Amino acid sequence: MHQLHPYWRMDYIEAPRYPASMLRPFSELPGLGDDRAALIVHRSALSYLLLNRFPYNPGHLLAVPFREVADLEELTAEERSDLMEEIVRGKRMLAVLKPDGFNVGFNLGSASGGSIAHLHAHIVPRWTGDTNFMPVVGHTRILPQSLDAVWARLTQATKA
């Protein structure tokens, strides 16, 4: 048997989760006053981008409207436009990670697998060959970089 020693993973495992008192994180995170702690990497007038605390891949972003709605049809035309601009901005920000492609999408409705009813889009960077045996055999994802390190990289890239 081979041993895996991803010692750097402990930073991610020990990273703070949403406080139990936070019942609606996407509505409450923007008001925390600390975008780094909230993992918010950009704010626009009507929506914002943040790193997913439970990412599929490093850099997995969420584009979230400030106004809490459950479906795309509930957004105004201005909110839909702003949210799409945030999705495009997120994709551009992720270029610093040099992905080979992206998955972009929404989980609409409880049957779709969405765990939070507040509408949000996923922007997931992908690399050729980024799938490995761990999700299939061990039901575990291996992330090569901590959320804090990715936050720092993405926010630095937007300042350049």
Image (cartoon, rainbow, N blue to C red):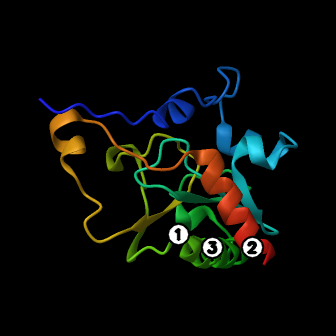
Dot 1 amino acid type: Leu
In the picture of the structure, the residue carrying the numbered disc 1 is 97
Dot 2 amino acid type: Thr
In the picture of the structure, the residue carrying the numbered disc 3 is 93
Q: Earlier in the sequence, mark 3 or mark 2?
A: 3
Q: Earlier in the sequence, mark 1 or mark 2?
A: 1
> Distance of mark 1 from mark 2, alpha carbons?
13 Å
State whether residue 7 is above or below residue 114.
above
The reply, left or right, for residue 159 in relation to residue 62 is right
Q: Nearer the viewer, mark 1 or mark 3?
A: 1
**What secondary structure is marked by label 3?**
helix
Mark 3–mark 2 CB contact (< 8 Å): yes
The reply, left or right, for residue 91 in relation to residue 1 is right
**Front-lying residue, 5 or 92:** 5
What residue appears at the point 75 percent right and 40 percent down from the top-left corner?
37
Dot 1, crowdedness within 10 Å: few (<14), some or many (≥20)? some
Mark 1–mark 3 CB contact (< 8 Å): no
What residue appears at the point 82 percent right and 69 percent down from the top-left corner?
45
What residue appears at the point 69 percent right and 28 percent down from the top-left corner?
22
**What secondary structure is marked by label 1?**
helix
Q: Specify whether residue 65 is in view.
A: no
Horizontal and vertical percent for residue 133?
18, 47
**Front-lying residue, 151 or 90:** 151
Quarter of the image for residue 29 reads top right
Mark sitting on residue 158: 2
Q: Nearer the viewer, mark 1 or mark 2?
A: 1
**What secondary structure is marked by label 2?**
helix
> Distance of mark 1 from mark 3, alpha carbons?
8 Å
Horizontal and vertical percent for residue 99?
44, 73
Horizontal and vertical percent for residue 3?
23, 31
